[in-house]
Amino acid sequence: MRRITEPLGTRAVEAGNGVRGSGPDGPTADHAISGTTGDVPSEGTGAAGTIRAEGLRFGYPGREVLAGVDLSVDAGELVALVGLNGCGKSTLLRLCAGLLRPGEGRVLLDGDDLSRLSRRAAARRVAILHQAAPAVPGMSVRQLVRQGRYAVRGPLGMLRDGDDSVCARAMADVGVADWADRPVDALSGGERQRVRLAMALAQDTRLLLLDEPTTYLDLRHQLEVMGTVVRLREERGLTVVMVLHDLGHAARFADRIVALRRGRIAADGPPEAVVTPQLLAEVLGVAGRVGRDPEGGWPVCYPDHPLDVEPAIAE
């Protein structure tokens, strides 16, 4: 499948030794940042909330995950990453958050090389909401949201009682302020996801990375989360990059879709240019049809059946 190019309306498309993790999720943040120095003065010229990945390669022994990815995201964009399991979507997100180091290439946050920033400095620039989170028995909504302030307040500041204005705004913005004293483990899946989104917002960054934010949620809560993300992006002027399995959600809510195939970008452009029967076949491995929503005009997919032949690597 050829990559979508400029005439079709597309936009132009974390250096150092590679970290080789021992499991599918790779190293922890502490391992990934070991050996970094303190904060460095900003030398970048990028606008706040911009991200650029240049020639990213990453892998584990015997398996290459990303095979040279170039990606630019402008301030205020909402970009969806799509593709089959194992194609490198979540790895790309973790690299852009500084939780992994690339084997080759680099990530620039607002024009600054991510590898030169300490973990706390990076967390002041970019927040990431992981697909899964460990259980938090006994922790209240307020206590969990306050964890998002660690990069700013530090370990001693986290011991202070009370919420600062940023936490209060984060809880209000996602509609969980009334639950502040409720235990997180007593909430439903959709409610917990909103609380976790508030925790990410409490980092008070311009760049928000979301790894499958609708996973395990029913349709009502999926739409609720997606609607909240779109609203917050507009109200706060956020740049949002999210991994999505639901191509329908990506086509409806994103400005731009980036499709990955075996660690490479296979297509990059607005939904109306990217979401085609060719994409379904050559990237997602299914035969299907694509129509248009009669009211909103966004692409709507009608997958028919899986293809017998595994999709080829995009050239």
Image (spheres, rainbow, N blue to C red):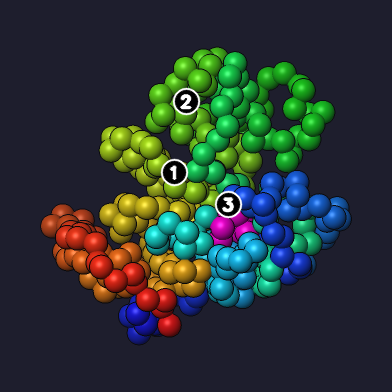
Q: Name the residue beneath numbered marker 1.
A: 213
Q: Is residue 93 magenta?
A: yes
**Which stretch did the figure color magenta?**
91-97
Q: Name the residue beneath numbered marker 3.
A: 24
**Residue 145, placed above or below residue 304:** above
Give percent across and percent down for residue 187.
44, 21
Question: Magenta region, mostly helix, strand or loop?
Answer: helix
| Residue 175 visible in the current orientation | no
Disc 2 is placed on an element classified as loop
Q: Are marks 1 and 3 in contact (CB under 8 Å)?
A: no
**Mark 3: few/some/many CA within 10 Å (<14, 14-19, 20+):** few
Disc 1 is placed on an element classified as loop
Q: Nearer the viewer, mark 2 or mark 1?
A: 1
* Dot placed on the residue nearer the N-terminal end, 2 or 1: 2
Q: Residue at x 30, y 66 (%)?
A: 285
**Mark 2: few/some/many CA within 10 Å (<14, 14-19, 20+):** some
Q: Residue at x 77, y 57 (%)?
A: 117
In the image: residue 60, left or right of residue 41? left
The residues bearing labels 3 and 2 have C-alpha atoms spaced at a distance of: 33 Å
* Dot placed on the residue nearer the N-terminal end, 3 or 2: 3
Which residue type does callout 2 highlight? Val
* Dot placed on the residue nearer the N-terminal end, 1 or 3: 3
Which residue type does callout 1 highlight? Pro
Where residue 180 sits, quadrant-wise, is top right
The residues bearing labels 2 and 1 have C-alpha atoms spaced at a distance of: 17 Å
The residues bearing labels 1 and 3 have C-alpha atoms spaced at a distance of: 19 Å
**Residue 67, placed above or below residue 199:** below
Which residue type does callout 3 highlight? Pro
Disc 3 is placed on an element classified as loop
Q: Residue at x 51, y 62 (%)?
A: 88
Q: Name the residue beneath numbered marker 2.
A: 176
